[in-house]
Image (tube, rainbow, N blue to C red):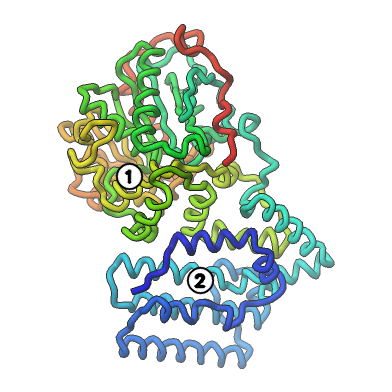
Amino acid sequence: MNLPDPQAIANAWMSQVGDPSQWQSWFSKAPTTEANPMANMLQDIGVALKPEAMEQLKNDYLRDFTALWQDFLAGKAPAVSDRRFSSAAWQGNPMSAFNAASYLLNAKFLTAMVEAVDTAPQQKQKIRFAVQQVIDAMSPANFLATNPEAQQKLIETKGESLTRGLVNMLGDINKGHISLSDESAFEVGRNLAITPGTVIYENPLFQLIQYTPTTPTVSQRPLLMVPPCINKFYILDLQPENSLVRYAVEQGNTVFLISWSNPDKSLAGTTWDDYVEQGVIEAIRIVQDVSGQDKLNMFGFCVGGTIVSTALAVLAARGQHPAASLTLLTTFLDFSDTGVLDVFVDETQVSLREQQLRDGGLMPGRDLASTFSSLRPNDLVWNYVQSNYLKGNEPSAFDLLFWNSDSTNLPGPMFCWYLRNTYLENSLKVPGKLTVAGEKIDLGLIDAPAFIYGSREDHIVPWMSAYGSLDILNQGKPGANRFVLGASGHIAGVINSVAKNKRSYWINDGAAADAQAWFDGAQEVPGSWWPQWAEFLAQHGGKKVKPKAKPGNARYTAIEAAPGRYVKAKG
């Protein structure tokens, strides 16, 4: 079976940003049958359907379309519940409502056809992903000729909305990405990443920031935070009211944080071992030196958590146990279920990346951004095509989406190692299978209580996969571990500030056989989960002491003020 390449599909959608002919199509014409790739996709990839299943699908489609057409001829507006078509402009225009309803019927038919395909689960998931990308792209809301909201605004503004839309379009072509937020509203170091601190160390791979204490006393053991290297660290330090870094400081912790560099050609040969040894292990050594403490509270977010855990396993193999506790937020250690990201990982795709990158090179940040946007194309692509270009609206100021567009590169060798050994072969959880930094590693040797957080609607790290870390870490003392489940997704669930006190979280301190049993017995609590984490840190922070007057020490002195240069580097 000639399966579609999901990475190619994701990149193809986003590459249209630089294709003027594609922009012209959004403004000037509706999609035609000949231009619509949906009709040929299943045939092109060699999908076989049982004749009886296909016959049933056809009969259902003809029945539903006949009823829709009869209602249209009778002047009866179809019921359309999809939020893309919920406005009065869609509902009040019979032709627009019919277009929306027929589009949704076609989408339903194609989706049902995919589900009826008789093939392996991963193959079906790839087909499902490819077909869904096409379905979302061909929505009548994405074209001026079939979007009554955009047409209405064009009339109301006497053409000004079209002019503004073209200006927005040209601006984004120059930037190379669709603007998700008002990018002029934010600047790193001015109103983002402004928690006071000092860079006390740097090497080509990272800067180490020590934040300024704000409380009369602090926990004796410092907190070392390791963010993901796929994006900039300031997702943890957005604005003061939603900064997890600032919150940790305000809870009486001496906070250190790794600010990863945005790799250029000079780092094109950097490996996973380098991120572990020259990154996290080096940072641990420096924090121990500066604080005078052998034990640290360790923290990792997303792939940062995977790197931290690998580093602690390397140190455990050397007989060293620097972690007083380990916090992992939306982190994979067991890659058995990687959710929708599974469509991007198979032997063919990983081997291709290895041929391209494993001996040196960069995985461009824009390609990674395309991949993640393709997971939610209606929210992160087509919504902005409609608003910014067809309607001429300016995107609103949203710090999280500003950060989302501030992508970083990854070194090819590091990226290839990560893909093969975790996503493809799931070797990290197997004791002794991998050698990192010269040591055979076993995550089960990490001797530290673990605080594991997952987000219930996370499409990048499914929460049950995050929960699976409990079976791997601190095996001799499982009662010392904690799992907290937050509402919302991969990022919004984590950045759930106490100041805003939104959403809710679930806790269950009893024993549970598996993730579902844990959830069945869990208690839902309104508000932010951050206080649960603060309590955990306090339990493992040691006694309270007076904070040091100055950052660093005689060996590690101030280099520059936080957030430092590295976080401002563009790819």
402 in relation to 8, above or below: above
User: Which residue corresponds to the image point at 80% horizontal and 67% vertical from the top-left?
Assistant: 156
**SS of the residue at dot 2?**
helix
In screen coordinates, is 319 left or right of 568?
Answer: left
**Other-residue count near label 1 (Cα within 10 Å), few / some / many at <14 / 14–19 / ≥20:** many
* Badge 2 amino acid: Val
561 in relation to 424, above or below: above
**Other-residue count near label 2 (Cα within 10 Å), few / some / many at <14 / 14–19 / ≥20:** some
Question: Quick one: quadrant of the N terminus?
Answer: bottom left
Check the image and name the residue furthest to the left: 476
- Residue 43: x percent and y percent? 41, 81
Residue wearing tag 2:
134
73 in relation to 47, above or below: below
- Residue 150 seen by the camera: yes
In screen coordinates, is 386 left or right of 103?
Answer: right
* Badge 1 amino acid: Phe
